[in-house]
Image: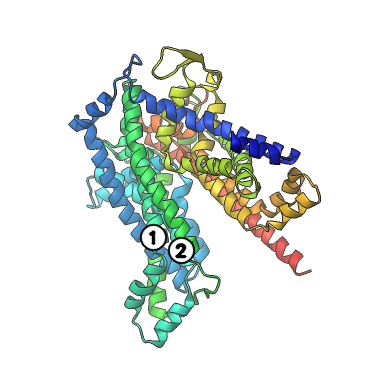
Amino acid sequence: MNYLNKIRSQLTSADGVKLALILCTLFIFGIFLAGPLMILFFKAFQDKSGAFVALSNFSKYLTSPNMFSSFWHTMDISLVSMVCSVTLAFITAYALSRRKIPFKGAFQFIARLPMFAPTMLLGMSLIYLFGNKGLLTGLGFAIPLYGRAGIIISETIYCFPVALMILMVAFSSADNRLYEAAEVLGTKPMRKLFTITIPSVRYGLINALFVCFTYSFTDFGAPSVVGGNYNVLATDVYKQVIGQQNFNMGAVLGIIMLLPTVVSFIVDRITSKKQASAISSRSIPYQIRPNKKADFLATAFCVVISLMLIGFFGISLYGSLIKFWPYNLTLTLSNYNFSDIGCANGFNAILQSIKVSILVAIFGTIIAFFDAYLVEKVRPFQKLRKVLYFFSISPNAIPGTVIGLAYILFFNPQWLTIPGTTFEIENVFSFLYNTTAILVCVNIIHYFAVPFITASTSLKRLDKEFELVSDSLNVSFIKTLFRITVPLSLRAILEMAVYFFMNSMVTVSAIVFLCTSSTLMASVVVMSVQGAGRDAQAAAICMILMGINILVRLLYEALEHFMSKKTEAWICR
């Protein structure tokens, strides 16, 4: 009460508006994040009738060898793919940032290709290459694709561009003075690598390791295509909920999936802060010195990686353009005629994906940027802002499958039972279930953390004097926001919108439980079509989704280049 009275006595009319906005944002997080997760948590301790059963569901899971093995399978593939993807990304980042090689921009763009495609496409490309009738299998390069090996390869490719982006940032913060001192002392290249280079990027390296672990631990798409009988947690949740309608055991698996990702998230936050604090204002940017042999090897490595990625996705493009792999290789566009796909027109599903992604990009960007503004630029209500910050970054630790399951449990019932009682309250938000709106909401929450951090970082770079001067002149903070803050943060806003759009186009895990025949998105159609053995049509849908994402990214980069030129011209006046 004393805290509330103190706040009330110090409030101005503008502060009252700010407080109301913070409380409204917290309410949104309460409904669309905290509420569903609480229902998921309570469901794990209940039986199908809703009776409290303590830890019996967890006991059943832990004592079932077939079910519990999926946890160790998931840990195994996550650890192996983490090491493989970060190793490849480290070498690539070193080559791009520390060696003089041509076409760096092209190499970086090609390295991002896995980010533009649904993860199911990674599995399908492997089938075209290493399946029973695969291209490389026929040449004698056979591998046990369906199971552990296939998932690890898919997850390695999936995580590679994420690790590369993190490590590129880490390498950019090098201090050239250390290397100059090493040169004077006659230090050999390998010794400089282990005594200067790796220690200087250690926080970024740790960050990349844990992020890649989380990505592979929670991925649903690739294991659903090449997993075979090698069960993992993400596919087990799907089987329990969709296959057996066992929501209680699905909730148990959801909580188990949360534990490693939460630990990974905490380590990621700690290392990110330490990496930021490790950058000194006195640091001198790294100066690349030509070395013909090292530059040639670095260029050759980047060329090999690029060709492998182009070939990897090229084989799926080829597979989508032939009649029937591998028996009839006649080129055709018939696979791009989606009118006879399953229960819904494939073109409608693609249009639905575009519609949802645009809505996610618009509303997600607005909410994330405004939320970051409340956290970073509003001076009073420090405790409430800390709570808001916690809610804003916490989606990064929650797997998409868990969020999707939580949304079913929260938004589907017409009445919600208060845990531990027989008292029920009407669920006023149940109208969202089976609508496009719930797909927009779940995607915004699922991918909220990264755009929020992007906006927060951008706002921290702006001078605090803008708000101080506005307050002293009694200028509305809303006017300051739209006339000064938003224009200065336009690049970050565009980056946020592109991130929301691209991920919403290819996501599966968060929406697979929530799509209906009337709201079906293309990425979910891919899963059902591929499961029915129609790989060519599934690959065709993936290529369209990938093409749309590449086009959006290219448009964004062209717009950013145009804005940079305009800014330089304005500065030079």
Write down the residue under mark 2. Answer: 170
Between residue 419 and residue 513, name the one nearer to us: 419
- Position of residue 198 measured from the top left corner of the image (x, y, whole percent): 37, 68
Between residue 445 and residue 283, name the one nearer to us: 283
Q: Is residue 70 visible?
A: yes
Q: Is residue 56 left or right of residue 423?
A: left
Between residue 317 and residue 270, name the one nearer to us: 270
Quadrant assignment, res 323: top left
Asked if the residues shown at circle 2 and circle 1 are in contact, with their CB atoms under 8 angstroms apart, the answer is yes
Write down the residue under mark 1. Answer: 205
- Position of residue 410 measured from the top left corner of the image (x, y, whole percent): 46, 23
- Position of residue 384 measured from the top left corner of the image (x, y, whole percent): 57, 40
Residue drawn 75% across the image and 48% down it: 480
- Position of residue 386 measured from the top left corner of the image (x, y, whole percent): 54, 44
Q: Residues within 10 Å of mark 1 (few under 14, many from 20)?
A: many
Question: Which quadrant does the C terminus fall into?
Answer: bottom right
Q: Is residue 303 left or right of residue 78?
A: right
Question: Which quadrant does the N terminus fall into?
Answer: top right
